Image: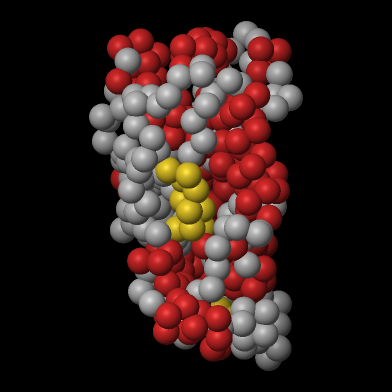
Amino acid sequence: MKNFLDKKKRIDLDTIKQEDLLKLRICDLPIQIEGTWLQDCIQQLYKELDGKGINFKPECYLADEWLTPENEPVIGIPFYLAHPELTRLEKKMMLEAEGDTKDGCMKLLRHETGHVLSYAYRLHKKRKWRKIFGSPSQEYGDTYKVRPYSKSYVRHLEGYYAQFHPDEDFVETCAVWLTPGSEWQKHYAGWKALKKLQYVDYLIEGIKDKAPLVSKGRKLWHYRKLKITLKNFYRRKQLLRAEDFPDFHDDNLMKIFSLFDETIKGLPTANELLWKNRRRILNDIAFWTGEKKYVINDLLKDIVKRSRELKLVAKDNEQIILMSLTAYITTLIMNYLYTGWYRGDKKKRKK
């Protein structure tokens, strides 16, 4: 044990070179919550729970991502938030670091607290809970259909996450209810979601000042158990989230279009051709796939933007290019319809 601690002490995250940092196993990182800004966020969460009359304060630990293990009333916080250098690495490798601001961190902590309260007090076992939110035993799918204008769900995290699953519906509703100054009674007046908020208010009233039925939980995916190196960790994470990166479309776009060449003059740019025909592409794909136009349009905008960045030009016959492009986008949309991802081969892990 002493050698293990001495090894950690020899690792200085403030001065280590990035190439050496990537060689480290996550479990060997000299990190902790105590003494960091995360501790302040957790203390604020505890104050918010106190303000609502909730005695239970969930234990937090460093994990591989934001999560609350199923039926375990504990909160996992991503290890990369425990040190600025690790946060910088996360942003470099993944383009963002989820929860790296005080506001973002608190939003996610309140979300996870919803799971914790459900598990600690077995709220999801109640018959009325199931009537209002649905069955918690419903399988977590690989995708979910978003209804952006629906007033049946609260809006807390991005991506209309409340619509994903009955558990997430309750958790997001609970997070809005818990947020100081949210004025949910006023903000959600006239919404069907207001009944859900009122039910959460009623539920919490019933557990105020009461000890939880389950107070301890297993800290699954704890960073100390992660023997993978940071390099391999990010290699896997990038593969899983490939479509979130700007170069996701590059290989296929290069098969349809050509790189700009100074020796070839007068060719239309790929983004010009795409934009000129966007309505036709949009209508055709929406007709044959049945997908909402706003989903297809968002994807099309990404492709137009990336074509511009790569300086691609339309060298072949316009109709052939449009046929190839429509087939490519249709394939992505069909993958999205059946898996929730454009790659068509990814799985979600429940948070």
Comparing 132 with 70, the one in front is 70
In the rendered image, residue 65, in percent from the top left (x then y), is placed at 47, 56
Counting from the top left corner in percent of width and height, residue 346 is at 34, 56
- Residue at the image position 38 percent from the left and 77 percent from the top: 1
Q: In the rendered image, which quarter contains the C terminus?
A: top left
| Residue 117 seen anywhere in this rendered image of the structure | yes
Relative side of 78 to 220, left or right: right
Query: In this orientation, does residue 92 appear?
Result: no
Q: Note whether 116 is above or below 249 in the view shown.
A: above
Q: Residue 328 is drawn in which quadrant?
A: bottom left
Q: Where is residue 222 in the image (x, y as percent from the top left)?
A: 40, 59
Q: Residue at x 49, y 58 (%)?
A: 62
**Of the pair 294 and 320, the residue shown nearer to us:** 294
Residue furthest to the bottom: 263
Task: Pick the residue in front: 177 or 191.
Answer: 177
Tell me which colouring the rendered structure shows. Answer: secondary structure
Q: Is 161 situated above or below 78?
A: above
The residue lying at 65 percent from left, 59 percent from top is 35
How far across and how far down the image is residue 306, in percent? 61, 66
